[in-house]
């Protein structure tokens, strides 16, 4: 389900939950006297359970990302989508997805998951050789699985907790552990850059990095403050925590 739909569904469901979970209401009324209403709520606000000690900073960064998206990123992405044929867009997306598989292979090896690492290597090889350098997703058409790992999940595998919730400039929501993992994953990508080793080009070069960012943002169906809710920050934080939890659970299967 797309993030936009998740957000809108969550707003509706949370509103219903908040209305339904107010309990222990005692109303004592007299004919001519003012009613005494006693309300005690034992239901915890589950959105407040996320560990967010840097919330003031995170909210400022959330707003900063909104402004950058509104003024810079959205116009660039819209222009890219307007001038680029769908066929070319799909080839670009496939290329970056294929290059990212090597990161999964490396992190699977770090966790001693030999089978998953070999599956990732097989997928990368199939798409690189038969898919013209990863432009075509041949592996998916052949029914090959799509394993995923990152260094944050590797740290989680060895018992490292998420740490505080964190909103990074441009990158958006993450956790302290995963922010560190993102840096390690970037280093891994540099070491496993097969295109650079073949002296074709560097996938970490500035133009390709910008193109990767545009392609990534294009495939995310979410825009800041599109829900018109004063609690959007809390909803996004909650949903991201659930999304990351799903990835952590899938990693251990």
Image (tube, helix red, strand yellow):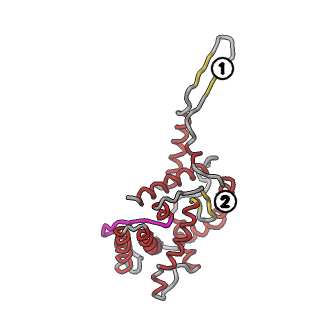
Observer-nearest residue: 128 or 120?
Answer: 120
What is the spatial separation of the Cα atoms under label 1 and label 2, in whole angstroms? 44 Å
Residue 46: image x %, image y %? 55, 43
Residue 182: image x %, image y %? 54, 68
Q: Residue at x 41, y 58 (%)?
A: 250
Q: Is residue 86 above or below residue 225?
A: below
Q: Residue at x 41, y 80 (%)?
A: 133
User: Residue 61: which numbered mark, if any?
Assistant: 2
User: Residue 36: which numbered mark, if any?
Assistant: 1
**Residue interval drawn in magenta:** 141-151
**Placement of the C terminus among the 4 image quadrants:** bottom left
Q: Place residue 130 in its image quadrant.
A: bottom left
Local secondary structure at mark 2? helix
Q: Residue at x 64, y 23 (%)?
A: 37
Q: Residue at x 57, y 52 (%)?
A: 237
Local secondary structure at mark 1? strand
Observer-nearest residue: 225 or 248?
Answer: 248
Left or right: 44, with 122 as reference point: right
């Amino acid at each position: 389900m797309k993030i936009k739909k998740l957000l809108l569904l969550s707003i509706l469901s949370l509103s219903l939950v908040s209305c339904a979970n107010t309990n222990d209401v005692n109303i004592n009324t007299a004919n001519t006297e003012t009613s005494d209403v006693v309300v005690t709520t034992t239901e915890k606000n589950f959105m407040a359970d996320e560990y967010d000690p840097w919330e003031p900073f995170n909210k400022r960064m959330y707003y900063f990302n909104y402004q950058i998206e509104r003024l810079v990123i959205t116009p660039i992405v819209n222009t890219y989508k307007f001038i680029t044929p769908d066929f070319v867009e799909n080839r670009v997306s496939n290329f970056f997805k294929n290059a990212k598989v090597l990161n999964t292979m490396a992190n699977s090896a770090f966790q001693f998951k030999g089978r998953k690492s070999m599956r990732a290597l097989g997928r990368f090889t199939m798409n690189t050789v038969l898919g013209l350098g990863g432009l075509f997703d041949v592996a998916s058409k052949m029914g090959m699985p799509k394993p995923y790992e990152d260094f944050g999940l590797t740290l989680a595998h060895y018992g490292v907790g998420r740490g505080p919730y964190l909103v990074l400039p441009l990158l958006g929501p993450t956790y302290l552990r995963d922010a560190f993992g993102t840096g390690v994953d970037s280093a891994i990508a540099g070491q496993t850059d097969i295109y650079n080793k073949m002296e074709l080009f560097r996938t970490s070069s500035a133009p390709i990095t910008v193109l990767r960012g545009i392609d990534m943002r294009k495939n995310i169906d979410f825009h800041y403050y599109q829900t018109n809710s004063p609690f959007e920050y809390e909803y996004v934080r909650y949903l991201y925590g659930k999304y990351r939890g799903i990835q952590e659970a899938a990693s251990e299967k």
